[in-house]
Amino acid sequence: MNNNAPIGVFDSGVGGLTVVKEIMKALPNESIVYYGDTARVPYGSKSAETITAYSRQIAKFLMTQEVKAIVVACNTVSALALETIKEEFDVPFIGVVKPGAKMAAQATKNKKIGIIATEGTIQSGIYEKFLKTTSPEVEVFGKACPLFVPLAEEGWLSDDVTKQVAQRYLAELKERKVDALVLGCTHYPLLRGVIGEVMGDGVTLVNPAYETAKELCYVLEDNHLLREANTQPVHKFYVSDGAEKFRRFANSILPCDHLEVEDVAVKSFE
Amino acid sequence: MNNNAPIGVFDSGVGGLTVVKEIMKALPNESIVYYGDTARVPYGSKSAETITAYSRQIAKFLMTQEVKAIVVACNTVSALALETIKEEFDVPFIGVVKPGAKMAAQATKNKKIGIIATEGTIQSGIYEKFLKTTSPEVEVFGKACPLFVPLAEEGWLSDDVTKQVAQRYLAELKERKVDALVLGCTHYPLLRGVIGEVMGDGVTLVNPAYETAKELCYVLEDNHLLREANTQPVHKFYVSDGAEKFRRFANSILPCDHLEVEDVAVKSFE
């Protein structure tokens, strides 16, 4: 394995860029190849079979880019497809669920953890399953928040409507008195302000993007895969639709001046 | 052409069922084959090239079901792909845009028409282009309302949050004093109550689903394609993902007791 190879990162669309941002901060020396499946976004309401098939196509594409590790920057894929596809490839896979769940277990004092995510992630019960294995004493309460992604994409980040929606979605978790809340969808950190305001000061918000970047550092170190080159890292972004729209969004959240974005359909990678 | 053949109807997902409902009312004798592309929904934010490719695959699939006409029950497809794909097949195609636009031109008194739809439909300017040709005296004002579909799917049909979102989206059209408003996305008739309340009594809401069913009657008559059989019509529903979820939604809006729903991937129809 070539240490100077890039890290592959993929998501159903633009949300995974919040993970890329954390990786760039934690590992500024590493090159990244990102794939956003913007032609088939969103994954949140699709079946496990469909999501597994799409993820396999994308992982095969990333392997053609000779990546040394693959980060699944999407909670839905991490919940529904990761365990299946990681067995099919020869590089380490890092999902966002386990790092997020681990941090939540560390952060909670009263052993009550809330999870907010897409319908697919919540129905999978993946966070609960993982936490029950590692921290059987915790209670886990999940809540799907389907309006959060379109509200974030509309840019209504600290809006009164968004606050009312958040109050409604989060009421049950507040009643349950959770003291740690996992932002279990990559778009949700964009609404962090409103979510924090509604939940109150006593609740720790866990951003799996940040925890995933830390986990990636450990995995690369353990596998002796950290980049050694002294040259500038090279980042490449591929999408299945709408390269120009993606570039504008990516430019607004990543600390890079000039992003190389290209359209590539991956459906032939079957 | 066989008069007893079914009518093909397709949409990016479940929204087109509002069109099916109107067709069943207007033409209770006709059989319907529906395709909902639930694995790739939504189309509203995708490019014209991608939407054209997906629509072509679905039309090819419907042709294998020996349909006698195809109804494009999706504003985005009608706006971005219909003119291209209708030339490639030997059956009549009916979109939702022209029937909706025609009715709006008839309904307006002050010659100011509002269009609400997805980003793709609004950016295409399709309603305006069509109206400028047929009714050059009208002024057309478009507004994308990306939160309306998720609000409708969340079931918040007459909710206070939905009303606030509607007030914000529709403020500009009210200022422009439009007196006819086209519900230019198949989900929007589900929010008809709130939209009507915000716009006020003086504004006629145009539902293209209803107008499209009428247009289909004319097209079948003109082409001598009305069904003659005295037997019960047979309806079939195909989706690219999540047949069971689709069945539940369809059962809630269609006047049928038992729906036959099957999963069929159409991506091989290229």
Image (tube, coloured by chain):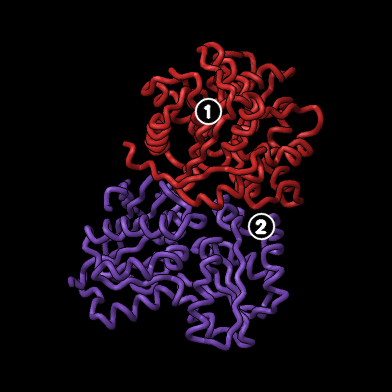
Chain colours: A purple, B red
Q: Measure how far apart labels 1 and 2 are at the Cα level.
A: 29 Å
Residue A173: % across, % down: 67, 72
In the displayed structure, A187 sits above or below A130; it is: above
Q: Is B166 situated left or right of B65 in this image?
A: right
Q: x, y (%) of residue B106?
A: 68, 16
> What amino acid is labelled 1 in the image?
Gly
Residue A179 falls in image quadrant: bottom right
Q: Classify mark 2: helix, strand or loop.
A: helix
- The subunit carrying tag 1 is B
Name the foreground residue: A203 vs B46: B46
Residue at the (68%, 29%) spot, across then down: B181
- Relative to the observer, which residue lies in front, B218 or A177? B218
Q: Secondary structure at mark 1?
A: loop
Q: Amino acid at mark 2?
A: Thr
Numbered tag placed on residue A162 in the rendering: 2
Point out which mark residue A80 bears.
none
Please state, as top left, top right, bottom left or bottom right, where the N terminus of chain B lies in the image. Answer: top left
